[in-house]
Image (cartoon, grey):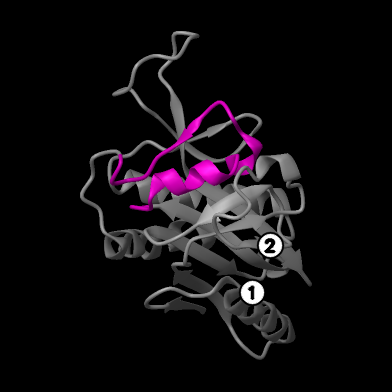
């Protein structure tokens, strides 16, 4: 059984990190079940293990936390559903690449619940949408915008960190960093796409799509 937890309000990043670290140990020892934890953070930036200092454009804008996960700089804040995924990858095949692909497929399935086509892009982490409603780029293509980020870490084959889906965050807050080191593309959200989607709607979709991805 996988436990699901939804935290109300805003959860501090250091608190979340400490909770995840403790839970990973408990899952590895068999004392507690796997966990999917849904929350929102106050505005902050996180630095992954591949982050470059020059990508932190405005270091004094929000607190910056060392995330100790893969990836580069990301933003978290109100209106963004953060999903910390603490699963036993060792018991699920020990294939890290396949596990990351499951996370991507999960996000894409959730977006599909709202008739949004999420896509992957070679060389770019996360899930993207094509903005057919915006002017074409200089290359004559519709612009791509990122709607979800993915970054995980494993310890004793237990995953932690996870994914974030932009529901209705302040997109201007992303301007203090180069999100995931990518400069040529923007960031969007479900509400920015014109959809009247609430956090509760996304939570229902996350739960509904989970088993079809992770129970196989």
Query: Would you identify the image quadrant in which residue 152 lies?
Result: bottom right
Q: Nearer the viewer, residue 3 or 64?
A: 64
Residue 80 position within the rendered picture, expressed as x and y whole percent measured from the top left: 41, 57
Residues tagged 2 and 1 counted as in contact (Cβ below 8 A): yes
- Taking the view exactly as shown, the residue that stands out farthest to the bottom is 31
Q: Nearer the viewer, residue 170 or 109?
A: 170
Q: Is residue 48 magenta?
A: no
In this rendering, position of residue 170 left or right of residue 128: left
Which secondary structure, mark 2? loop
Position above or below: 54 against 83: above
Residue 9 position within the rendered picture, expressed as x and y whole percent measured from the top left: 38, 76
Residue 190 in sight in this render:
yes
Residue 25 position within the rendered picture, expressed as x and y whole percent measured from the top left: 72, 82
Residue on which the image places disc 2: 67
Q: Which residue is located at x 59 percent, y 63 percent?
A: 63
Numbered-mark total: 2
The magenta region covers 167-192
Disc on res. 28: none
Residue on which the image places disc 1: 17
First of labels 2, 1 by sequence position: 1
Query: Would you identify the image quadrant in which residue 171 lies?
Result: top left
Residue 143 position within the rendered picture, expressed as x and y whole percent measured from the top left: 43, 23
Local crowd size for mark 2, using a 10 Å CA cut-off: few (<14), some (14–19), many (≥20): many
- In the rendered view of the protein, which quadrant contains the C terminus? bottom right
């Amino acid at each position: 059984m996988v436990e699901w937890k939804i935290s109300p309000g805003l959860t501090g990043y250091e608190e979340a990190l400490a909770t995840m670290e403790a839970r990973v140990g408990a899952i590895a020892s068999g004392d507690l079940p796997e966990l999917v934890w849904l929350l929102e953070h106050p505005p902050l930036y996180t630095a992954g293990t591949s982050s470059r200092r020059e990508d932190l454009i405005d270091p004094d804008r929000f607190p910056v936390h060392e995330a100790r996960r893969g990836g580069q700089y990301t933003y978290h804040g109100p209106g963004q559903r953060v999903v910390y995924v603490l699963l036993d990858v060792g018991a699920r095949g020990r294939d890290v690449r396949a596990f990351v692909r499951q996370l991507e497929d999960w996000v894409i399935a959730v977006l599909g619940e709202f008739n949004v086509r999420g896509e992957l892009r070679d060389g770019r982490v996360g899930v993207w949408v094509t903005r057919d409603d915006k002017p074409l780029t200089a290359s004559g293509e519709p612009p791509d915008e990122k709607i979800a980020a993915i970054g995980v870490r494993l310890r004793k084959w237990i995953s932690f960190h996870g994914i974030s889906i932009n529901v209705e965050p302040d997109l201007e807050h992303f301007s203090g960093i180069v999100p995931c080191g990518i400069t040529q593309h923007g960031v969007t959200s479900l509400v920015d796409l014109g959809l009247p989607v609430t956090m509760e709607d996304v939570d229902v979709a996350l739960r509904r799509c989970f088993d079809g991805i992770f129970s196989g």
